[in-house]
Image (tube, rainbow, N blue to C red):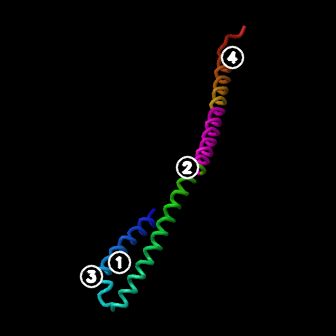
Amino acid sequence: MKRQIAAESKKRSDTAELAKLKDGKKTMKSLFKSKAGKEQSVLNLEAALEGGDQEIADYKKLITFLTIYHGQESIPNFKAAKSGMYLKTLNNFCVKEISNAHASALLYHSMLDIGAPKE
């Protein structure tokens, strides 16, 4: 996203520079250039704009691909892995609670045996 935004920003600045050069206005970049140098700059900027358009389109395709990949592959796999770990942890907790309850029952049963009068 950052690279796409940077490419779009560069395209806007190049477009503004190209418009100024075509109108014959002086800019900081073209202040000391000859007429032939300015014409070469116009050609270079036009080529850069065409390449920039393709670069922006490629970034948009990449972002779309990554969005689809995350939605269809990564996130479901992540959810499944985390759900499995959660269920395993919950199962271990339940087993430990049952073991503790059994130990408590044995303790209370032995306490009943100790306190019961013998005949």
Kind of residue at badge 2? Gly
If the image is split into quadrants, where does the C terminus sit? top right
Kind of residue at badge 1? Leu
Location of mark 3 (residue)? 25
Location of mark 2 (residue)? 71
Foreground: disc 2 or disc 4: 2
Foreground: disc 4 or disc 3: 3
State the residue lying farthest toward the front: 23
Question: Which sits earlier in the primary sequence, circle 1 or circle 2?
Answer: 1
Foreground: disc 1 or disc 4: 1
Q: Nearer the viewer, residue 69 or 114?
A: 69
* Res. 18 mark: 1
Question: Which sits earlier in the primary sequence, circle 1 or circle 4?
Answer: 1
- On screen, residue 95 above or below 44: above
- What is the CA distance from the residue labelled 2 to the residue labelled 4? 62 Å
Q: Are marks 1 and 4 in contact (CB under 8 Å)?
A: no
Kind of element beneath mark 4: helix
- On screen, residue 22 above or below 83: below
Question: Seen in the image, is 13 located left or right of residue 77?
Answer: left
